[in-house]
Image (cartoon, rainbow, N blue to C red):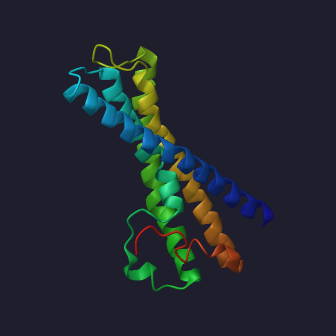
Amino acid sequence: MALLRGFVRWIERLNEAVGGVLSYATLACVVICFLVAVLRYVAGVGFVWMQEAYVWLHAAVFLVGAGFTFKVGGHVRVDLFYRPASARRRAWIDLFGCLFFLFPWLIVVTGAAWRFFAASYVIGESSGQPGGLPALYVLKFMLVAFCLLVGLQGLALMARSILVLRGEEDFASRLEGEGEVAR
């Protein structure tokens, strides 16, 4: 069980670190978007790479940050059964949800995302716009990173659920809605 506890803590620290970095990416996205608007409407100058940069950052925040959002309970969930449930029942719901919904979906999405990324990487795809950002495959790899980080957080949630079902109530805090974004 110590290995399982360590695994949960490691994955959750990883997604917390990613979330922390992405908080700065969100700020950078806003600043770049502001600069694009000011340069375009005040100075009459436009840079395609700047426009693409804030789109890429926006994609990174949403795709790469999905694991962090999953960790803090920020994704949409039907609380009709979950909210009033005990920690043990929540653990069962989370185990079932990960096994029968999350992971089958992630397998399909990962396969498609990998093919999408690999095809782009092989041809060295870059922006279709003159002056755009090179290495478009980096943007497409964010889909793979999404699958990886959400999948790891799903494994951590399953491990946390197993710990709760084995009587380790100190791991029930996530199952009881610790860090919920909305109630």
Task: Relative to 168, say whether 136 is above or below.
Answer: above
Q: Position of residue 145 (x, y in %)?
A: 51, 40
**137 lies left or right of 4:** left
Total of numbered circles in the picture?
A: 0
Q: Nearer the viewer, residue 111 or 52?
A: 52
x 40%, y 70%: residue = 182
Which residue is found at the position 69% from the left and 59% from the top?
9
Q: Residue pushed farthest front?
A: 42
Q: 69 or 20: which is nearer to us?
A: 20
Q: Position of 131 compared to 163: left or right?
A: left
**Where's residue 132, x and y in %?**
33, 19
Depicted 33 relative to depicted 84: above or below: above
Residue drawn at (47%, 66%), measured in percent from left and top? 97
Q: Residue at x 52, y 70 (%)?
A: 94
Quarter holding residue 45 = top left
Furthest-right residue in this view: 2
Across and down, in percent, residue 51 comes to: 31, 28
The answer to whether one can see residue 89 in this image is: yes
Which residue is more in the foreground, 34 or 80? 34
Q: Quadrant of the C terminus?
A: bottom left
Q: Which of 86 and 17 is in front in this view?
A: 17
Assign the N terminus to one quadrant of the image.
Answer: bottom right
Q: Is residue 110 visible?
A: no
